[in-house]
Image: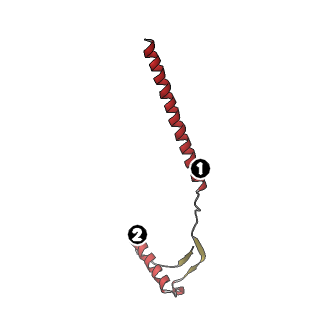
Amino acid sequence: MMSILQDFANGLIMSLFSIILVFIILYLLTLSVSLLKKTKEVPKESIKQSNHSLKIEDITDPDMMVAALVASIDYQESTKKDVRLVSIKEISK
């Protein structure tokens, strides 16, 4: 009878030790992930927009005209409505 109680007590101690060890490892993992998230903050406004708007008449570069047309076509396809291009903002990196 003493042997069964002793085996049960040893098993209980080993189980509790294992559970505590698992929770300690999980806590260390969450701590390291949270520290990595704090150090790797991405700036919210990485693209700078110029303050002045361009009109359609101001476009002289063919690449700018293509970009404006592609943007208006893409917007029209996503909204499924008629689109009228009024002004353009230049985005610089």
Height in image: 45 above or below 70?
above
Q: Position of residue 58 (x, y in %)?
A: 54, 86
Q: Position of residue 11 (x, y in %)?
A: 46, 24
Which residue corresponds to the image point at 53% horizontal and 39% vertical from the top-left? 25
Which residue corresponds to the image point at 52% horizontal and 36% vertical from the top-left? 23
Front position in the image: 26 or 77: 26
Q: Amino acid at mark 1?
A: Leu
Which residue corresponds to the image point at 45% horizontal and 12% vertical from the top-left? 2
Which quarter shows the N terminus?
Answer: top left
Give the left or right position of residue 45, taking residue 19 as reference.
Answer: right
Label 1 SS:
helix
Give neighbour class at mark 1: few <14, some 14-19, many 20+ (Cα, 10 Å).
few
Which quarter shows the C terminus?
Answer: bottom right
Front position in the image: 61 or 69: 61
Q: In the displayed orientation, state which residue is furthest to the front.
A: 3
Q: Which mark is residue 78?
A: 2
Q: Which mark is residue 21?
A: none
Give neighbour class at mark 2: few <14, some 14-19, many 20+ (Cα, 10 Å).
few
Q: Position of residue 6 (x, y in %)?
A: 47, 17
Front position in the image: 22 or 6: 6
What is the total number of numbered labels drawn onto the structure image?
2
Label 2 SS:
helix
Q: How is the image coloured?
A: secondary structure
The residue where tag 1 is placed is: 35
Q: Amino acid at mark 2?
A: Ser
Distance from Cα at disc 2 to Cα at disc 1: 39 Å
Sequence-wise, the earlier of marks 2 and 1 is 1
Which residue corresponds to the image point at 57% horizontal and 53% vertical from the top-left? 37
Give the left or right position of residue 90, taking residue 84 as reference.
Answer: right
